[in-house]
Amino acid sequence: MKLTYWSHSCFLIETRSHRLVVDPFLSGNPLAPVKATEVRCDFVLITHGHNDHVGDAVEIAKRCGATIVANYEVAMFCQSQGATVHPMHIGGSWTFPFGRVKLTIAHHGSAYQTADGFVNGGQPAGVLIMTEGKTVYHAGDTALFMDMQVIGQRHRPTVALLPIGDNFTMGIEDAVQAVEWLRPDVAVPMHYNTFDLIRADPQEFARQVRAKGYRAEVLAPGGTLTV
Ligand code: NI
Ligand code: MN
């Protein structure tokens, strides 16, 4: 499985048979290495309703004929915009053609902002993607929470994608604690440096993770990791 970091919380995940994109915030993202119109994928996964995560999901899904996977409220909103969706909710899992997806808790908000006000985006989530004998845990936007120990014990993540930007989510110190609780094979930082409010040094995160005996990989926008 190959992961490509498209900056912020956006990753392309390529399995042998399918292309998945998580949280495709590309238009209006100063760090995005690709344009939304260049994306080809089969599924779009959205962790929560915030605009920097829903991003270009609807346009990409409609153009590619991809299915959006998100919590019920975000899925219904995307469906109202013309996208094909698969609604889920926290604790639930479903087997898709590429593998199994399970939504986990995340401590955050989820409202989607439109010109007319906010749309209720339900509860924010993290996403476990289980495919080809590997498990990717994309934490979404979240505070540190102790149930990450349970996620670590029960799902043994191969890769943990963790926000480090602070202010809206975990900062570096809490993200390092998250790695200790999740015990992934490799930790990858996300959700930093897109905006001034979330400035953080991913190399500092990597140093601290390695000092605890875990592997960390910092991906530049467009950078890849094969696991
Ligand atoms: Ni958010
Ligand atoms: Mn965010």
Image (cartoon, rainbow, N blue to C red):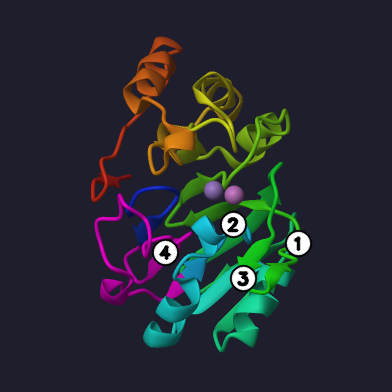
For the C terminus, give its image quadrant.
Answer: top left
Q: Residues within 10 Å of mark 3 (few under 14, many from 20)?
A: few
The residue under the point 58% across, 32% down is: 167
Where residue 56 sits in the image (x, y, percent)? 44, 70
Looking at numbered disc 2 in the image, what kind of residue is underneath it?
A: Thr
Side (left or right) of 11 relative to 44? left
The residues colored magenta run: 15-43
Q: Secondary structure at mark 4?
A: strand
Q: Which mark is residue 47?
A: 2
Which of the two discs, 3 and 1, labels the residue nearer the N terminus?
3
In magenta segment, residue 34: yes
- C-alpha gap between disc 4 and disc 3: 23 Å
Q: Please, what is the dominant secondary structure of the magenta stretch?
A: loop
Q: Residues within 10 Å of mark 2 (few under 14, many from 20)?
A: many
The residue under the point 42% across, 36% down is: 196
The residue under the point 56% across, 21% down is: 180
| Residue of label 1 | 122
Looking at numbered disc 4 in the image, what kind of residue is underneath it?
A: Val
- C-alpha gap between disc 1 and disc 4: 21 Å
Q: Secondary structure at mark 3?
A: strand
Which of the two discs, 1 and 4, labels the residue nearer the N terminus?
4
User: Cβ(mark 2) to ligand 1 < 8 Å?
Assistant: yes
Against 44, residue 9 (above or below) is above
- C-alpha gap between disc 2 and disc 3: 18 Å
- C-alpha gap between disc 4 and disc 2: 11 Å
Can residue 158 be seen here?
Answer: no
Q: Which mark is residue 114?
A: 3
Side (left or right) of 62 relative to 2? right
Q: Nearer the viewer, mark 2 or mark 3?
A: 3
Mark 4 and 3 residues: CB-CB less than 8 Å, in contact? no
Where residue 8 sits in the image (x, y, percent)? 41, 47
